[in-house]
Image (cartoon, helix red, strand yellow):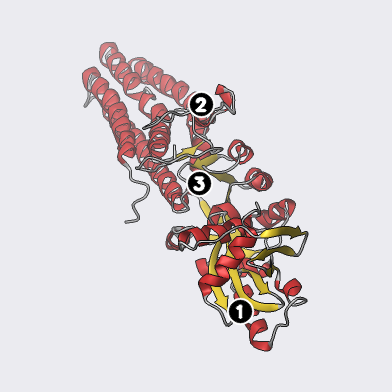
Amino acid sequence: MTGESVPKTKGIGEPVYAGSVNREAALRIRVAKAAQDNTIARIIRLVEEAQEARAPTERFIDRFSRWYMPAIVGLALLVALVPPLFFAGEWAVWVYRALALLLIGCPCALVISVPAAIAAALSAGARQGLLMKGGVVIETAARTGHVAFDKTGTLTRGQPRDTDIVAFGRDEREVLALAASVESGSAHPLAEAVLERARTDAIGFAPATEAAALPGQGVTGTVDGRAVFVGAPRHAAARAPFDRSTRAAVETLESAGKTVAAVTVDGTLAGLLALRDEPRADAAAAVAELKAMGIRATMLTGDNARTGAAIAGTLGMEHQAELMPDGKVDALKRLAAGTAVMMVGDGINDAPALAAAHIGIAMGSGTDVALETADGAVLKSRVRDVPALIRLARAAMGNIRANISIALGLKAVFLVTSVLGYTGLWVAILADTGATVLVTANALRLLRFDAGRTA
């Protein structure tokens, strides 16, 4: 489910996937979803939907076959009747050639060339954590020229981290301990980031007394008899004066897309904490891979312009910020001018954009709504799986074109040789069967395709 190769530790209140194997200790689990709504069931539904959706090429082959066979039958009748009736040909010879033509003209190889490749690509993708809802998605992914990413939870971890500590006249560890003491009773995401940093740095702290949350400002509390405030710089400035260097430090951190919290103690500024939802470890590499493939990458985010620009600059991609869900849809329409656009997201607010794009891909760790709305998913929630999915789709389309060429090429050659009498029924049978075997074997090569390999 997760792609991790080591056991995952689970604590109280954490979700557990259906199908997980308990490795040690007793475990009591509360069922949160019906069987048809769990993660495995959703994946199964994605695969089932993949079998139902037909690709444009597949539909073309079906239409081609509808007039192809009548044409072959008509040609066989002409071969059987015209030479004996009008050119004194031998009936046995020309009827035999007509039968050989009928055999070689059988469209088995042509009809199976597309679905065999699509089935192999879907299977190869599923094994690598790349789910696509059928051939339509494969074809669209193969011609993608622009990929739009949501930011939070897609390009970033979705969890703010304490990245910087700036101390004024104190030790950095003391500043962090003071902040952790005041934040210890808060469930705010930024508070969780401060507490996580304190635990990571092995900093001991005791919960503050008289702790209180000030809506829209921050939190206060008493630590060892000292009044401590942690909150936005503009509110902290009302409690402790900021000099020019302090304001410059705040601006520098905020220009990097970080959220700054100030820590004051008894009316004096103790330090600054900078927090940011950091990009995923593989995000920059994924953007670089897309560029190498000739695909543009743009970040669409509802976050403020400064944060959006900082994250996009770190990853080396274009960006559009302060977008509401409908704004993302409008942005996609502009990006779609002259090229197929893929949207990658994970949240409920991404659902309209996932549906509006030529192809929508959901992160496997995303919401149920995103997974249901999308045309596919990257189950391991790795950004590099997005270019991998496109590589697999391109390989599948190349395989399909090769299969069609093999099927039509062999038939064209043996149709001519059958009419001219160079090949008989047995050769026609072998040629027809051989063409089917060849296209099937060629399609099966996709099962070994490593989508993550860049060269």
Q: Identify which amino acid the numbered label 3 is placed on.
A: Ala
From this viewpoint, which residue is outermost toward the front?
225
The residue wearing badge 1 is 252
Residue 200: % across, % down: 46, 60
| Element under disc 1 | helix
> Residue, x 35% and y 16% (percent of image)?
80
Viewer-nearest of discs 1 and 2 = 1
Look at the picture and state if 307 lies above or below 408: below
Viewer-nearest of discs 1 and 3 = 1
Task: Specify which label sits upstream in the sequence, 3 or 2.
Answer: 2
Separation of residues labelled 1 and 2 (CA atoms): 51 Å
The residue wearing badge 3 is 141
| Element under disc 3 | helix
Task: Specify which label sits upstream in the sequence, 1 or 2.
Answer: 2
The residue wearing badge 2 is 48
Direction from residue 431 to residue 307 in the image, left or right: right
| Element under disc 2 | helix
> Residue, x 66% and y 72% (percent of image)?
262
Residue 177: % across, % down: 56, 66
Q: Nearer the viewer, residue 391 or 309?
A: 309
Question: Which quarter shows the N terminus?
Answer: top left
> Residue, x 61% and y 57% (percent of image)?
207
Residue 333 in view in this figure? yes
Q: Nearer the viewer, residue 204 or 287?
A: 204
| Label 2: how many Cα within 10 Å (few below 14, some 14–19, many 20+) | few
